[in-house]
Image (cartoon, rainbow, N blue to C red):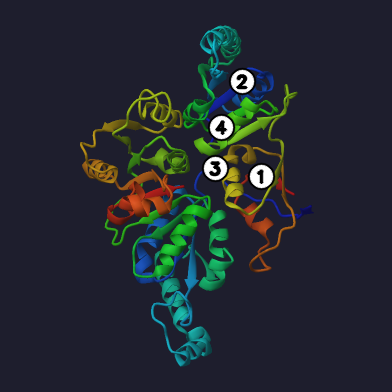
């Protein structure tokens, strides 16, 4: 057994306290930084950018560079490609919010030694940008979803939303992933002006959705002070993801809360799945837990 | 965050400790309390008079369950406001999903620890199928404070991160929290031992960390 001694921790009310934004490049991750900033201000939380450095010789570098270039990049040290990107990110953050903390991780070590996930485990919410060309982003998103145990907010690129978390659609399928996502999202739901619990083709039963799909969840949310409506949607043969996106459009939702990957990833690749469809097509921020 | 929705699950064999814990929690955080009584019906044995035997046995079991439920209902009436009564009475194969459905909307599920196999099945349903946290009480627990001195077993894994997040209201109100790791090897940066990160993640107000 190993006991360590630490100084007292101070904190305020419960809720979102630390929002972490893993960042690879400013161009592709600007939406995530902006979202983290917006949420941090709304919830009086700290925001931290985790700058992930990809060096020229890295497995995750965009192109395979000749050895001479790799060596030159290493030799350039603080003037190398990764360092230059970090400086760009730091300057950008300095301009929008000096209180944004900056943390660093080098991608090889960070991914194999799970350093990025370790950072995430100490945050209340991780925010990242979707899509983008870099494979490393997909790897990190998966690590966040499946390993971190914390919720992940995936921002679309580009993100033209004017608000975040004011009109929230909850895609409810009565699964444990959805239950985790909803409860992880409580700090945001409590501040929202409008929250809708949407079910797609939900059939009443003695388990799963229960006799009144979505109603129990609505009652639970109401006890937490969330103003909530329930909409049981008839898919009419359309895939669930489309039903949810259509409902999000109807209410001009600025965020969707869903459980991620109820089916395994392998199954979704073969059979398709709601998570995969939403990740590919939804144009609004997705708040997900697994 | 506070606990607003509490579910107490009892099976045939136990209940007092679980309700005692629920009362302690409800006294601290005014919340909606629901009690779920879970009973398993026997499978029919394939034999010459299997159906008749099953009918007899099941009739008796159902009567016993009804008596148990009446007691649970009575116990729930002592909460203020009175707790909500729920029940599950079904076959072994259907118990997990029915329990998970009931637990899905709770902030915290409370149960008593016991070696009873039905209890074990219910706990697994809560832990694996509902996504909600479970507070297990020793079977002889009847009254006292909960959460004054808390020991956190930190494994730096996903499950630990979730447990800490789910226990936030308790951690916030604790007088003292001790974080323990077993054979922890920092995989990164000697400057940030796992303990400090765990402590930083806990958002505890005014408690002393040990």
| Residues marked 2 and 1, same chain | yes
* Image location of residue B12, percent across then percent down: 63, 17
| Residues marked 3 and 2, same chain | no
* Image location of residue B23, percent across then percent down: 63, 22
Q: Is residue B148 above or below residue B53?
A: below
Answer with left or right where residue B177 lies relative to residue B45: right
Q: CA distance from mark 3 to mark 1?
A: 11 Å
Residue picked out by circle 4 = B108
Chain of the residue displaying label 3: A
Q: CA distance from mark 4 to mark 3?
A: 19 Å
Tag 2 and tag 4, C-beta contact below 8 Å: no
Q: A211 and A227: which one is in front?
A: A211
Asked which secondary structure carries label 4, the reply is strand
Tag 3 and tag 1, C-beta contact below 8 Å: no
Q: Nearer the viewer, mark 2 or mark 1?
A: 2
Chain of the residue displaying label 4: B
Q: Residue at x 48, y 91 (%)?
A: A72
Tell me if mark 3 has few (under 14), some (14-19) or many (20+) residues whose alpha carbon lies within 10 angstroms of its own.
Answer: some
| Residues marked 4 and 3, same chain | no
Residue picked out by circle 1 = B206
Residue picked out by circle 2 = B11
């Amino acid at each position: 057994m190993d006991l360590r001694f630490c100084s007292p921790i101070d904190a305020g009310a419960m809720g979102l306290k630390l929002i972490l934004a893993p960042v690879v490049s400013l161009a592709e991750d600007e939406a995530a930084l902006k979202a983290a900033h917006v949420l941090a201000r709304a919830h009086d939380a700290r925001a931290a950018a985790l700058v992930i450095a990809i060096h020229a010789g890295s497995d995750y570098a965009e192109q395979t560079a000749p050895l001479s270039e790799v060596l030159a990049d290493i030799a350039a040290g603080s003037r190398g490609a990764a360092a230059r990107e970090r400086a760009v990110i730091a300057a950008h953050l300095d301009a929008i919010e000096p209180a944004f903390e900056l943390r660093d991780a080098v991608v090889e070590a960070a991914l194999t030694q799970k350093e990025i996930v370790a950072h995430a485990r100490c945050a209340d919410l991780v925010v990242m940008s979707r899509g983008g060309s870099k494979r490393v982003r997909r790897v990190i998103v998966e690590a966040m979803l499946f390993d971190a145990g914390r919720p992940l907010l995936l921002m679309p690129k580009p993100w033209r939303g004017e608000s975040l978390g004011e009109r929230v659609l909850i895609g409810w399928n009565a699964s444990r992933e959805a239950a985790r996502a909803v409860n992880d999202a409580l700090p945001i739901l409590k501040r929202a002006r409008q929250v809708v619990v949407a079910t797609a083709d939900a059939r009443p039963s003695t388990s799963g959705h229960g006799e009144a799909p979505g109603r129990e969840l609505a009652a639970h949310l109401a006890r937490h002070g969330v103003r909530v409506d329930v909409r049981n949607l008839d898919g009419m043969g359309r895939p669930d993801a489309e039903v949810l996106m259509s409902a999000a459009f109807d209410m001009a939702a600025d965020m969707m809360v869903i459980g991620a990957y109820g089916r395994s990833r392998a199954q979704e690749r073969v059979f398709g799945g709601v998570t995969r469809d939403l990740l590919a097509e939804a144009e609004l921020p997705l708040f997900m837990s697994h | 965050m506070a606990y607003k929705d509490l579910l107490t699950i009892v099976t045939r064999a136990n209940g007092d400790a679980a309700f005692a814990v629920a009362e302690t929690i409800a006294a601290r955080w005014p919340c909606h309390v629901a009690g779920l009584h879970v009973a398993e019906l026997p499978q029919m044995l394939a034999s010459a008079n299997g159906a008749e035997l099953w009918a007899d046995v099941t009739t008796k079991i159902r009567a016993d369950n009804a008596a148990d439920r009446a007691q649970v209902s009575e116990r729930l009436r002592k909460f203020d406001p009175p707790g909500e009564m729920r029940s599950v009475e079904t076959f072994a194969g259907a118990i997990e999903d029915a329990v998970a459905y009931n637990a899905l909307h709770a902030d915290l599920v409370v149960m008593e620890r016991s070696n009873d196999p039905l209890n074990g099945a219910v706990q697994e349903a809560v832990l694996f199928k509902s996504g909600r946290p479970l507070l297990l009480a020793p079977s002889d627990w009847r009254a006292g404070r909960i959460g004054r001195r808390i020991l956190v077993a930190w494994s730096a894994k996903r499950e630990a991160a979730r447990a800490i997040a789910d226990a936030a209201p308790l951690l916030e109100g604790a007088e003292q929290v001790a974080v323990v790791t077993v054979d922890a090897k920092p995989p990164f940066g000697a400057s940030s031992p796992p303990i400090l990160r765990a402590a930083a993640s806990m958002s505890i107000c005014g408690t002393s960390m040990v």
